[in-house]
Image (cartoon, rainbow, N blue to C red):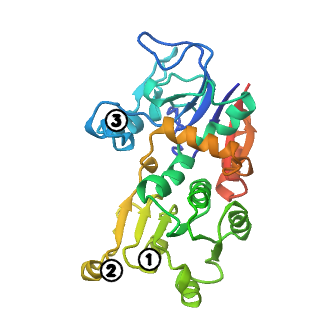
């Protein structure tokens, strides 16, 4: 079995992309100690594991992150065509992948069977980002009211993590009623459908849920600005979704001096993948992280349908399966 998550990273041919996957090791190179042939593995981002940020437990801010995860490298190929690979240390949008050791989480002892390996395949990027935004970036506690803008895979993970932390209020913000209903099932205490009412109008009606933490997974400028305005004193805005190129968040320095608000970036949830994935799997076993409600499977040959359904919002986490 070989699975990977369908993504919308690049529309170009001759680039093998993808950022998370699961499978079994077929071969290992010299000096590799993390896995043996036959081991089940989960994949995540790559890091050098030796710079000051990696050494301090923050591999998502590795000095070599852009090179190891975005640039990739050519080949190897058998034909004349040049194919660029090693995207996120894996380029797993394929039946077989040559993977950097830094991208590997050995799942031996973590998963009970191939069905679980398939289910856990998306944990190493979006899910760990949402969870890490709550646990690592903001260190949310039961005293926090957490607003999550955009309930896709990252947003749902943040909602479930906030529930695990016992946050006093968890507010889901989206335009799709079905997703907001699912957000309530997964832990949201309040929902805001922005197709019907604005965030500010909702908070005017119920000031008790004014957020101390706002996690934006959309990158939509209007939502970013409204979320920043909605925060209470000393509130934290976490930017997870990527805003349009060239966009600058308006910032009134004097106002934020007196309110103590913070704007924070969030790369991969500031997670250490091996720890993050183990924690999420344990939450799943404890019934606190029901990702089976978010994952949909497609044969690899039906990747176009998976991408279409991801675009139209009818699925949350499409997973391609090779057999």
Q: Nearer the viewer, residue 58 or 245?
A: 58
Of the residues tagged 1 and 3, which is closer to the observer?
1
How crowded pointer 1 is (Cα within 10 Å; few <14, some 14-19, many 20+) is rated as: many
Q: Nearer the viewer, residue 3 or 308?
A: 3
* Residue 67, label in figure: 3
| Residue 225 visible, this orientation | yes
Is tag 2's residue or tag 3's residue first in the polypeptide sequence?
A: 3
- State which quadrant residue 123 falls in: top right
* Residue 231, label in figure: 1
Describe residue 63's horizontal placement relative to residue 16 as left or right: left
How crowded pointer 3 is (Cα within 10 Å; few <14, some 14-19, many 20+) is rated as: some
Task: Kindly state the secondary structure of the residue where label 2 is placed.
Answer: helix
Is tag 2's residue or tag 1's residue first in the polypeptide sequence?
A: 1
Q: Return the x and y of residue 6 as percentages of the image width and height.
A: 62, 42
Image point (53%, 68%), residue name: 146
* Residue 259, label in figure: 2
- State which quadrant residue 3 falls in: top right
Describe residue 277's horizontal placement relative to residue 322 as left or right: left
- In the depicted structure, whether residue 122 falls above or below residue 145: above
Q: Are marks 2 and 1 in contact (CB under 8 Å)?
A: yes
- In the depicted structure, whether residue 305 falls above or below residue 260: above
- In the depicted structure, whether residue 288 falls above or below residue 185: above
Real-space CA distance between mark 1 and mark 3, rounded to the nearest whole angstrom: 36 Å
């Amino acid at each position: 079995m070989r699975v990977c998550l369908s993504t919308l990273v690049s529309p170009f041919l001759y680039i093998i992309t993808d950022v998370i996957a699961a499978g079994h090791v077929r071969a290992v190179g010299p000096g590799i100690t993390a896995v043996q042939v036959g081991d089940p593995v989960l994949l995540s981002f790559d890091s050098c594991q030796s710079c000051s940020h990696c050494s301090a437990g923050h591999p998502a801010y590795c000095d070599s992150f852009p090179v190891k995860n975005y640039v990739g490298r050519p080949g190897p190929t058998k034909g004349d065509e040049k194919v660029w690979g090693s995207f996120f240390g894996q380029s797993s949008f394929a039946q077989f992948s040559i993977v950097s050791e830094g991208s590997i989480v050995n799942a031996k002892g973590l998963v009970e069977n191939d069905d679980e390996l398939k289910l856990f395949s998306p944990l190493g990027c979006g899910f760990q980002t949402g969870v890490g935004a709550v646990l690592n970036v903001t260190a949310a506690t039961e005293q926090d009211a957490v607003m999550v803008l955009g309930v896709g895979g990252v947003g749902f993970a943040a909602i479930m993590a906030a529930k695990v932390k016992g946050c006093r209020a968890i507010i889901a913000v989206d335009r799709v009623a079905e997703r907001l209903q699912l957000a309530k099932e997964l832990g949201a205490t309040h929902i805001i459908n922005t197709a019907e009412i604005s965030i500010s109008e909702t908070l005017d009606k119920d000031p008790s849920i004014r957020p101390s933490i706002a996690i934006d997974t959309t990158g939509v400028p209007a939502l970013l600005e409204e979320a920043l305005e909605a925060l209470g004193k000393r509130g934290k805005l976490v930017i997870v979704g990527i805003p349009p190129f060239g966009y600058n968040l308006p910032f009134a320095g004097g106002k934020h001096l007196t309110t103590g608000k913070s704007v924070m970036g969030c790369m991969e949830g500031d997670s250490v993948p091996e720890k993050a994935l183990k924690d999420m799997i344990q939450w799943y076993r404890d019934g606190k992280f029901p990702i089976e409600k978010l994952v949909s499977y497609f044969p690899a040959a039906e990747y176009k349908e998976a991408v279409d359904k991801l675009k139209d919002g009818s699925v949350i986490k499409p997973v391609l399966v090779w057999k």
